[in-house]
Image: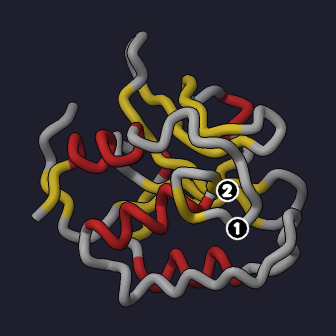
Amino acid sequence: MIKRSEIVKMAREWLEVPYRHQGRNRLGVDCAGPLVHIAREVGLGDKFNDQLIYTTNPETFSLKKQMDSVLERIQPEEIRPGDPLLFKIDVHPQHVAIAVDYYGGGLGMLHCHSKVGKVIEHRLANVWMGRLIQAYKIPGVEEDMP
């Protein structure tokens, strides 16, 4: 069983890694990269079909279907550190982040932002909550964070 704090720690190991479309290593990742690696670390790698056949602006719901099939759906008010988050940037679900504990209190999010050019962490602001399509919990996560 894995603890929420361990998921957050794994996510933060990706901070500052440069953006690279479909990247999956320390030389570069896109927004899905950290989640794919966390899924492998917690034993979901065989269930999480990491398909590298998408454009920089995905236009299908395949990402949501994939996440729905592997992760537990939760309500926005249930989001806790370590939970994967799925956002829309334009119309379709296309951006992934991991909820973290924000150093100033409350929730933050860790994600690879192509416009910033690297993996970053910041407060989970209202603008991002307005883009939230679905929040998830990784199955079998042990509660150890408020």
Q: Quadrant of the C terminus?
A: top left
Instruction: Report which quarter residue 113 is drawn in.
Output: top right
Q: Is residue 146 left or right of residue 88?
A: left
Amino acid beneath label 2: Asp
The location of residue 111, given as percent across then percent down, is 59, 43
Mark 1 to mark 2 CA distance (whole Å): 6 Å
* Mark 1 element type: loop
Asked if labels 2 and 1 touch by Cβ distance under 8 angstroms, the answer is: yes
The residue indicated by pointer 2 is 30
Alpha-carbon neighbours of circle 2 within 10 Å: few (<14), some, or many (≥20)?
many
Upstream in sequence: badge 1 or badge 2: 1
State the residue at coordinates (52%, 87%): 49
User: In x, y percent, where is residue 66?
Assistant: 56, 82
Give the number of marks.
2
Q: Nearer the viewer, residue 25 or 68?
A: 25
Instruction: State the residue at coordinates (36%, 89%).
Output: 46
Give residue 52's quadrant in the image: bottom right
Q: Amino acid at mark 1?
A: Gln
- Nearer to the camera, 32 or 129: 32
